[in-house]
Amino acid sequence: MINDQLDNLYARIRAEEREARESRVREAYARAPRLRALDEERAQLFIDLGARRISSEASKARLSEIFAEEKQLLASIGMPEDALELRVRCKQCNDTGYIGTTNKPCSCRLLKRESLRGSDGINARETFANFSVDFFPTAEQKKRTVNAKILCEQFAATLPTPEKPSILLFGMPGLGKSFLGNAIAYDALSRGIDAERVTAYAFIQTVLSDIREQTQKAARYQTVPLLVLDDLGSEPVIPNVSFEWLFAVINERTLAGLATVCSTNLTLSQLQTRYDDRFMSRLCDKNTTLVLHLTGENLRTVK
């Protein structure tokens, strides 16, 4: 559904840019009729060159003269030198949504996808650039959070293959854990690295839906280059489902070297009580996981 929406969006963008070019061309021709003659001459030059009725050296020389005269004429009527060209909003994908002839999504398509998802997706508000240090009530809390932000930025900068593939952010509510997780994901999308952000609750709901409907929507969470698993511990406790599936996705991703960011409002001791030793051993393995403890006052109430 979202892919269809994105395809339609890019088709609309391309159509809008074609219409905009046609409008600029009509205006330019009306204000400087000589431009039409130059455009027609250039088209004929390409035809003659293809038919080998003119030498490449001669055609290149004349084309240079045409471009120079066009530039001068456009400037004389107050129009930019690219007024007659078809413009694109994204130079990476030329408004197709994909890089070159591959099926790799462009960063602009990834960001547009999250915008269509709305509150369920990775948002453009909680980014490293929007990280503010103005609301911390104490110097110690500010220092600890800024340090965590720096480490998260370093992690994001080395995606998709950071030195340690996982981050665990834990601490009381309102300390910026979800913000940092979203910032990592947004940074990844901006560089064309696919990412998913999902709460532990929503993840389990997707798993349950897969079981009921015989689908495999949750499988994407095991293979996406970056997974941000937010609010670990908020998921319902469903025997033989919740902990088993959470462990499976975290374990499989770790073994595959895929980047994973988990955040939780629970303490390590609370996590230990909620999950088993095997789960905790994987979640907090210091060989593969950067464990960041945020402390202090709830920033939502301080603001």
Image (cartoon, rainbow, N blue to C red):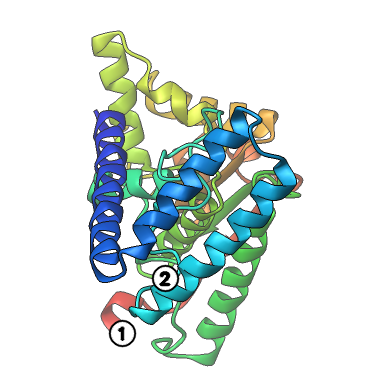
Report which quarter residue 277 is drawn in.
Answer: top right
Q: Position of residue 65 (x, y in %)?
A: 59, 63
Q: Judge the density around disc 1: few (<14), some (14-19), many (≥20) Cα neighbours within 10 Å.
A: few
Query: Mark 1: which secondary structure?
Result: helix
Give x and y (percent) for residue 92. Answer: 53, 49
In the image, what residue type sits under mark 2?
Answer: Leu
Q: Quadrant of the N terminus?
A: top left
The quarter of the picture where residue 266 lies is bottom left
Q: Is residue 96 left or right of residue 66?
A: left
Local SS, label 2: loop
In percent of the image, x 53 and y 60: which residue is there?
Answer: 66
Q: Which circle marks residue 302 in the picture?
A: 1
Left or right of 84? Residue 295 is: right
Q: Which residue is mark 2?
A: 175
Q: Nearer the viewer, residue 161 or 274?
A: 161
Q: Is residue 186 above or below residue 68?
A: above
Q: Which quadrant: the C terminus?
A: bottom left
Query: Relative to 173, is 279 on the left or the right?
Result: right
At horizontal 48% and vertical 36% (from top left) the residue drawn is: 98
Query: For this rendering, which residue is in front, 2 or 175?
Result: 2
Q: Residue 293 falls in which quadrant of the image?
A: bottom right
Image height of 257 relative to 159, above or below:
above
Q: 148 left or right of 135?
A: right
Position above or below: 100 against 209 = below
Disc 2 packing (10 Å; few <14; some 14–19; many ≥20): many
Q: CA distance from mark 2 to mark 1?
A: 11 Å
Task: Name the one closer to the observer, 172 or 221.
Answer: 221
Q: Position of residue 143 (x, y in %)?
A: 58, 83
Disc 1 marks a residue whose amino acid type is: Val
